[in-house]
Amino acid sequence: MPKIKVFPHPEMCPKGQDIDGKVGETLCEAMLDNKIPIEHACELSCACTTCHVIVRKGFQTLKLATDEEEDMLDKAWGLEANSRLSCQIIIGEEDLEIELPKYTINMVSEEV
C-alpha cells in the first residue's frame, strides 16, 4: 500500500500527515478519507483548480496530465512544474510526497 506524506499546511493540515493510499483511488479522495479538508469545488470533475497540489516526490511515477487538466492548471495559484490536480492523480504503487499550496482561487468551499 503506497504511503502519502502531506506536508504541513497552516489551515488544512497544520502538523502534516502520513496516510495510506489505495491503488486506483484519487489523491483527493485519499486526503478527504483521512480528514484532510482539501478544497474540491467541482466535485472532483477537473473543472476547477481548488484541489491543486505540488508533488514533491513521486511526480515522475504518475500518469501524464491530460490536456484538460493542463488547461485547468494554467489557472491555479502558485503553479509549479510538478503541480497537479489531486482529483486527477490516480494513486499507483509508488509513495508520494505532497505539498498543499498556500492559496486557492476558490470563492466557496465545499464541506467535507
Image (tube, rainbow, N blue to C red):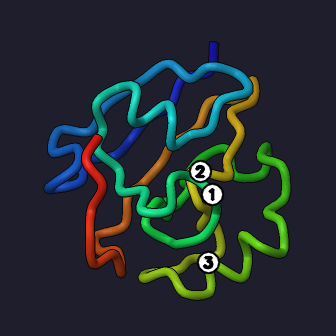
Q: Quadrant of residue 25?
A: top right
Q: Amino acid at mark 2?
A: Cys
Q: Report the Cα–Cα distance between label 3 and label 2.
A: 12 Å
Residue 44 or residue 105, whichever sits in front: 44
Q: Quadrant of residue 99?
A: bottom left
Task: State which tag comes first along the sequence, 3 or 2.
Answer: 3
Kind of element beneath mark 1: loop
Residue 106 or residue 23, whichever sits in front: 106
Q: Residues within 10 Å of mark 2 (few under 14, many from 20)?
A: many
Residue 28 lies, with reference to residue 5, above or below; the image says below
Residue 57 lies, with reference to residue 64, above or below; the image says above
Q: Amino acid at mark 1?
A: Ser
Dot 3 corresponds to which residue?
73
Dot 2 corresponds to which residue?
87
Residue at 78% in and 51% down: 60
Task: State which tag comes first along the sequence, 3 or 1.
Answer: 1
Dot 1 corresponds to which residue?
45
Kind of element beneath mark 2: loop
